[in-house]
Image (cartoon, rainbow, N blue to C red):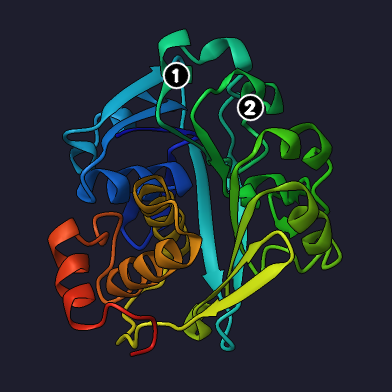
Amino acid sequence: MHFVVIGHLTRDIVPGGYTLGGTASYAAIAAHRLGAQVTIVTRAAPEDARHPALAGIEVVCLPSPHTTTFQNFYQPDGVRLQQVQVVADPIFAGDVPEHLCKADIAFLAPVCQEVDPAIAPRLEGIVGCAPQGWLREWDERGRVYAIPWRSAGRLLPYLDMIALSKHDIAADPDILAKLRSAVPVVALTDGHAGSIVYTGHQMQTVAPRPASEVDATGAGDIFSAAFMVRLWESKDPVAAAWFANVAASLSVEASGVECAPTRADVEAYLRQYPVPGA
């Protein structure tokens, strides 16, 4: 399958420097390790588009003098506070090459309002998104805060799948009903509790895989990519959620952008536990 990811690569500040981050990078690396042919359409400094972790992935890097940069602060209760220091320019509909619009899977992966909603009508395959980047803004000091999804009406008619967390909808909890009525498949993640899949009027809770957590950064992005890969293969949302739960839980047992498991890792666990929660 050809899996296209659209969104900013980021620099995430860490002690002593920075690391590659962003939904686009985690999702692309996960999809690649699960066997997909992957292309990222992004806007970042050229050196970040050539990061070694992206080896084997085609990167269409639109011109930019800098890369969107975040710094994360974790409170004692585990809640993450974010500050954005630099934001690269948006990715507009005309920036996405025509041939990439025909990919089997297109995944819209904004981190800071950068993905133009007008891209969605151009896409021809399965279209999914992780809307986190449309659910946040930042103040004059760069402090990130949650907002309602104001562009949802422009996107929902074109989406086949959406993945988000309970934390993502904290600023607008009523939006879940709207998403369920407009999008064929909605996957809602809930950390250690696993995930819930909504298909029309049906709801299915999918158990988690027990994990020894080291670093949960990027787990939701890896879930999203794994879910779309398996949904394209199986056409079964519940099977896709179990596959994605396993992939995401394996990822939290390591750290860094290269924490995504391989296809062999996921399938080895699924051979032992083919049924969720078995």
Query: 14 or 5, which lies in front?
Result: 5
The answer to whether residue 202 is left or right of residue 73 is right
* Three-letter residue code for mark 1: Lys
Q: Is residue 151 above or below residue 235?
A: above
Query: 140 or 88, which lies in front?
Result: 88
* Three-letter residue code for mark 2: Ala
Image point (60%, 18%), residue name: 122
Number of other residues with Cα within 10 Å of mark 2, as a class: few under 14, some 14 to 19, many 20 or more: many
Q: Quadrant of the N terminus?
A: top left
Image point (48%, 67%), residue name: 238
Q: Is residue 240 visible?
A: yes
The answer to whether residue 156 is left or right of residue 80 is right
- Camera-near label (1 vs 2) is 1
Image point (68%, 63%), residue name: 168
Mark 1 or 2 closer to N-term? 1
Picture coordinates of residue 36, whole percent (x, y): 26, 39
Picture coordinates of residue 5, whole percent (x, y): 44, 34
The answer to whether residue 106 is left or right of residue 133 is left
Q: Is residue 69 above or below residue 276?
A: above
Can you identify the residue that label 1 sits on?
A: 102
- How far is disc 1 from disc 2 in space, using C-alphas? 12 Å
| Residue 240: quadrant of the picture | bottom left
Can you identify the residue that label 2 sits on?
A: 120
Q: Is residue 146 visible?
A: no
Picture coordinates of residue 216, whole percent (x, y): 41, 72
Q: Quadrant of the C terminus?
A: bottom left
Picture coordinates of residue 61, whole percent (x, y): 39, 20
